[in-house]
Amino acid sequence: MPRDPHPPGIPSPGISQIPHPPGPPSPGTPVPRMSQDPHLPGTPSPGCPGNPILSMSWDPQDPHSPGPPSPGCLCPGCCRTPILWDPHPPDAPSSGCPGTPTPGTPSPGTSISRTPLTPLKCPIPGASPPVAILGAPAEDPAPAVFSADKVPAGLDAIIIGSGIGGLAAAVLLAKAGRRVLVLEQHGKLGGCCHTFSEKGFEFDAGIHYVGQMHEGSMTRFIVDQLTEGQLEWVPMPAAYDAVVLGEPRRSRAHRVLTGEKEYFNGLRERFPGETAAINKFEQLTKSVVSGMKAVGILKLLPLPLARLLCRSGLLPWLSPFCRMASRSLKDVVDGLTANAELRAILSYIFPTYGVLPSKASFSMHSVLVNHYLHGAWYPKGGAGEIAFHTIPIIQRAGGNVLGRAPVQSILLDSQGKACGVSVKKGQEVVKIFAPTIISDAGLFNTYERLLPAEARALPEIQSQLGMVKHGEAGFSVFVGLTGSSQELGLEATNYFVYPGNNLDEIMKRYLTSSRDEAAKSIPFLFVTCPSAKDPTWEMRHPGKSTLAIVTFAKYEWFEEWKDEPVNKRGDAYEDLKKTFVDAVMEVVFKLYPNIEDKIEYISGGSPLTNQHYIASPRGEIYGIDHDTTRMRAEAIATMRPQTVVPNLYLTGQDVFTCGFVGALHGALFCASAVLNRNLHLDVLRLRKRTQAPTNNYKKRD
Ligand SMILES: Cc1cc2nc3c(=O)[nH]c(=O)nc-3n(C[C@H](O)[C@H](O)[C@H](O)COP(=O)(O)OP(=O)(O)OC[C@H]3O[C@@H](n4cnc5c(N)ncnc54)[C@H](O)[C@@H]3O)c2cc1C
C-alpha cells in the first residue's frame, strides 16, 4: 500500500530514502504507538487524572503507572526506571546494577562531546561507591556519526538540531513513548551545550553559568526529570558575577551577591545615597517577573485568541511584564538615577541576552536579573554532561541522536505538510520520513534555509520573519593554561569588564566602527574560568586550567571569509582575529596578572566560528534579537512552536527566550504542542506530588 508521499520507487542516483514503517495511517498523520503510551491525548482511560508524561514509568501515587520498580533498585536503566528520581538518595550503587556504568563504556554517541567523568549514581544502600568512567577515551572512536543504517525504523518525529531545545523536546517525547531521531550538523552533540577539546584543553561552547538551579526550584526539577537526576550542578561562589568599570583590576569590582536581600543590599551598601533608586529598581524587576505568566498564556492560547488579547489593550494593565516590555533598559534606568556608575551596574547583565541598553527591553532585563537572584550554577563535569545524560533516554525509547547530519531541507508532501527531511551525507542525499518534524535550528535557519520556497513564501511565515531580526554576533577567546586555577589565582566568579560607565555609548561606538578599528574599542568582556568552577576539573585535567572570554562582534567584519573552509580562511582572516585576541588579552592580563607566561593554547572564535559550529546564520550568540520588538505581546504570541506548515514545529531559544533555561522552556512548549497537552502543568502537578513532606519509599518500608 503506498503510504509515503515520496515512495521509494526507483531512487534517483545518490538519494537513499528511509521510509515510514509499513501500515496505516497515511503520511502526515501522527502514528500513535499505543502499546507504549496508554495515555495519548484524546484516549484517556475513564477517570484518568491525566497521567503526566514525566512520570510515565512509575509513580507510587499514580494509579496508571506501570508498577513498582525492582525491589530496592532506583537506578537508571532498570526495566522499571522511576522517572521520579529521589533528589536525596543514599549515595551508593550495588555491584552489577544495570545503571552503573563500567569503565570504558561511555554511553553511545554522547562521548563525542565529552571528556568522560561523571559517575551515574546508582543509589542502592550498602553497595560499593559509584564507578567513575575514568580511563575511557576522551573522543569516542566510533562517534554517533550519521549514516542511513543508524536511523531507527518507525520514527515518530525528527528533530533538527541537538541544542538543549532539541534534546529536551526529544526526551519529553521519548518519555511519552515516541521514537525520535535528532539530527545535528556538527560532529559534536549538544549545540551551545557542547564541549570540545583542543590541544588537551576542554572548553564549553556556550554554557558558562545557569540560574535557578537550587534544589527544589521548578527549573531544577525539570532538569532533574529530563536527566533522571544524573546531571549534577555545582553552585558558583556567593559572588557569582563581578563588575569592573574602567581600569580592569579585580580589587575595584562590584561583586554581585547570591540571594534577593544580599543582591540589593550589596547595591545599597555600595551606593548609600541611592537607596530610593535601588528600591525602585528592585520593585520594578520583581513586579515584571511576577507578570511573566502572561508570556505563557500568550503562547498557549489559540493564536487568534492570543492576537485578540494583544489588540484588546488589556495586557499592559494585567501584566507588568507586558507593560514594561516596550520600555528600554536605558530609558528606565536613566529615569531612576543620574549616578553613572549605578546606571552601569544596574545594567551590567545585558550581555547575557545580548542587546545594548537603549534597545533592550526592560522586561527581558528583569528576567535575567531575577534568573540569577538565587545564585548561579555550573554543570558538574562541564556542559557536555547535558547531552551525555539526555541522549540515553532518547535511545532507550528507540530513538537516536546523530551528528554530522546537516539537514538540507524539510520535505513537504503534496498537501504542503512537513513529512521528512533530507540530509547530506558526502555526495549523497538521504531522505528520512516521519509524521512530525521539529526544528531547533532557529527561526531564520528553519524558514529561510530549510523550508522549500513555496512554504517560505506563505504570508504567515513572511510576517513572522518581518517581526524579528538577527541577534548580535559574538567573538570568543579560548585560553589553555599551564598550572591549576589555584596556582594561577583564577576565580570561579565571572567578570564583566567594561572600560567605562556609559555602557550604551561604548557599545554603540564599537558596533558602528570599521572592522580595522573595532578591536581598539572593545566595550565589554565576559571573563570566565571553567576550570575554577568545576570541582572535577583537577582530577580530569591535572595541572591545567582554562579561561573563556566572550564579547560582541559584527558579522559583517568577518563576512568576507564566510565561504572559505573552516581553519583555512587565510592569513588576512587570522590577522583580523588576532587583533581582537590581542586586545582582549591585554585586558585579561590586567585582571589575572599571573597568567601572562602560562599560555599553552589560545584561539579566537569569530562570528564565522559560531556559524560553523552552532549553525547560527550570522554568528548570533542568542538567536533572534531580544530587543523591545521581540518582547511585544504580538511577537511573543506569534513566536510559538506551531507553524503554519502542518506537522512542522519549532523548539529552543527562538520559541521562548535565550539561555539554557529559556531554550528548555521552548522545548516544553514544543513538546506540549506536539503531544497536545500542557507539560508545564504536568510538571507543576508532578513537583507538588513528589515534594510531599514524607518520603514515599520510606513510608512504604
Ligand atoms: C558563547 C555563548 C555563551 C553562552 N553562555 C550562556 C550561559 O552562560 N548561560 C546560559 O544559560 N546560556 C548561555 N548561552 C546561550 C545558550 O547557550 C543558548 O541560548 C541555548 O543553549 C540555545 O539552545 P537551542 O537549543 O535553542 O539552540 P542551539 O544550542 O544553538 O542548538 C541548535 C542546534 O541546531 C543545529 N543545526 C542548525 N541547523 C542545522 C541543520 N540544518 N541540520 C542539523 N543541525 C542543525 C546547530 O548546529 C545547533 O547544534 C550562551 C551562548 C553562547 C553562544
Image: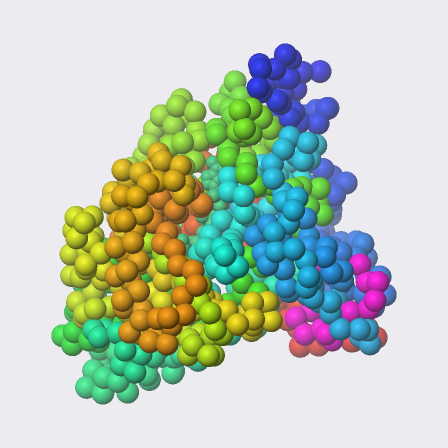
Q: Residue 477, how many percent across, how many down? A: 36, 58
Q: Name the outermost residue toward the front.
A: 597
Q: Is residue 160 left or right of residue 634?
A: right
Q: Residue 301, how many percent across, how many down? A: 45, 46
The number of callouts visible is 0
Q: Was residue 94 drawn as part of the magenta stretch in this picture?
A: yes
Between 186 and 698, the one nearer to me in the picture: 186
553 versus 247 height, above or below:
above
Q: Is residue 73 left or right of residue 684?
A: right
Which image quarter holds the N terminus? top right
| Residue 79 in sight here | yes
Q: Which residues are magenta?
A: 82-98
Query: Dividing the picture into quarters, in which one does residue 104 lie?
Result: bottom right
Q: Residue at x 56, y 24 (%)?
A: 428
Q: Is residue 110 left or right of residue 605?
A: right
Between 54 and 404, the one nearer to me in the picture: 404
Q: Name the outermost residue toward the top.
A: 10
Q: Residue at x 39, y 59 (%)?
A: 602
Q: Residue 132, how many percent across, how many down? A: 69, 66
Q: Is residue 387 left or right of residue 524?
A: right
Q: Residue at x 72, y 47 (%)?
A: 396
Q: Was residue 474 drawn as part of the magenta stretch in this picture?
A: no
Q: How is the image coloured?
A: rainbow
Between 69 and 76, the one nearer to me in the picture: 76
| Residue 419 in sight here | no
418 versus 351 height, above or below:
above
Q: Residue at x 49, y 23 (%)?
A: 416
Q: Principal SS element in the magenta part? A: loop
